[in-house]
Image (cartoon, rainbow, N blue to C red):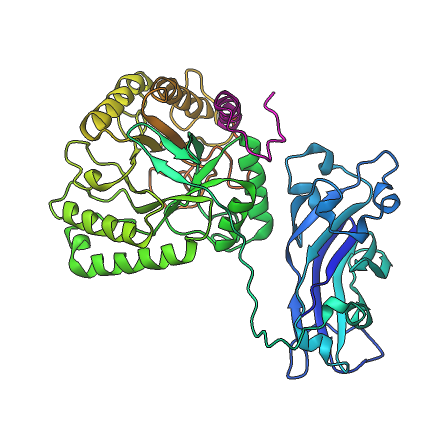
Amino acid sequence: MKRPGLQWIGTCFCTAVIWNVCSSLDGGMLFPRESPSREVKELNGLWNFRADISSDRNSGFENAWYKSPLAETGPVIDMPVPSSYNDISQDTRLRDFIGWVWYDREVWVPARWVQDKRTRIVLRIGSAHYYSVVWVNGKKVTEHEGGHLPFEADISAVLRSDPSAITSESGVEDVYTLPVGIRTVKVTNTQFLINNKPFYFHGVNKHEDSDIRGKGFDWPLIVKDFNLIKWLGANSFRTSHYPYAEEILQMSDRHGIVVVDECPGVGIKDIRSFGNASLAHHLEVMEELVRRDKNHPSVVMWSVANEPAAEMPPAGEYFKTLISHTRSLDATRPVTFITDSNYARDKGAPYVDVICVNSYLSWYHDPGHLEVIPIQLNTQFENWYGKYQKPIIQSEYGADAVPGLHTDPPMMFSEEYQKIVLQNYHNVFDQKRKEYVIGELIWNFADFMTAQTITRVVGNKKGIFTRQRQPKPAAFLLRERYWKIANETGVLPTWARYPCP
């Protein structure tokens, strides 16, 4: 096998592939297509990225960054390819940066490509703007001036000249790498402990949703969302209301973002939803979820459902069985479900490790009456804790805000109303997190599309960011709060590079 280290410098990468061909062709550069004699390996995805911010923008050349992995030369950030680096981060220096920027990634090439000397291995750059230099394993293979058009280099000799390119005859038939993170999770009746230290969830609920692509997987969007999560000072999110793409959990692992991993148990409202057929399927789904995500250290808790009709008579036995089954699959993580039922009638709550409560005071309940929030929220917490003696997360709260809509006094759907709703919740959170409230997850990270109803203004507008990922005033409120909590608790992630003003 061959693992070339690819490094490029330039300004904007659009696409990259490695492909093998059987013979050289003159007369034009063919677009890479697979065929019985040709293979293509896409290099699109996450790359390491570093801008040369030295005064003369020449430090990368002077210190030969191309001779070693880019991460060993200094701080790097994730950068999706294809994308324009200017729009991905929250760093204003990158928005208008002019100078050399460096990309690199580690790539595995099939051993047969290297071993068969008849095979040409070609590296093709679909577009890089404006001047580019390319190294493979520290060796310069090509450079190109001009954007928008492809260029390529035959890297066969470079790969075959490296001793590490040849697989030994030891009989090894398969190799798989699995990133590992070690940590412990424990729940008491008042705390959530990670590595035996109290952890307070200050985070978001999300949806896999954006303009045009809907729920389609998109690396630039994912990286942008993580940059915004870090900008907020958030330390966690919940995969509401379904398992997210595995690449998102891999990002969470790398960046130290804690995840409440939720199965697609939504809409369990009908008595038939608690029948044997539904339960059997639900058990199977949890098996699939745990099997898929058990090795992600960022996942600290399983959520088996969102807002079920937990007050219905069969709900008790249903959730007892479901939660017991989930614990049998993974005894190292607590299990919960997200409830909006009355505390006295919730038949599933006795079986969870953490109480996760959704409430929309002064929105769906007593709409327009901001004055009820402190009283009702305090009562909510007292009732739940008094009955179950378990730590509580406010798993959803919020209000819709149409971007640009302003009213004074604050009225529903205005940006002012959303902000003051959050402030009223926060005042109670600050009292109760000294006791048994262990987290707050805003609904929602960003506006998202829904079916048309009289309660929706072109989708759900409870996001603190618009669907295009631009901040509303509530985003700045949360940013100030989350960084304050992070500094108070002393639980600052390693990526804490955006200080709160």
| 164 lies left or right of 209 | right
Judge from the rendering whether residue 76 lies leftward or rightward of residue 230; answer left or right: right
Q: In the image, residue 119 lies at what x, y percent?
A: 75, 79
Q: Nearer the viewer, residue 471 or 239?
A: 239
Q: Residue at x 31, y 30 (%)?
A: 392
Q: Does residue 193 sit above or below 164 in this rendering?
A: above
Instruction: Provide residue 78's location: percent of width, then percent of height.
Output: 64, 46
Image: magenta residue range: 474-501
Say which quadrant the N terminus sits in: bottom right
Q: Residue at x 68, y 83 (%)?
A: 37
Q: Is residue 416 above or below residue 148?
A: above
Above or below residue 148? Residue 206 is above
Q: In what quadrant of the picture does the C terminus appear? A: top right
Relative height, residue 314 to residue 488 (above, below): below
Magenta stretch: includes residue 488:
yes
Q: Decide if residue 264 is in sight here.
A: yes
Name of the residue lying farthest toward the left: 313
Residue 286 image point, x, y percent: 32, 55
Q: Provide residue 394's location: percent of width, then percent of height.
A: 34, 31
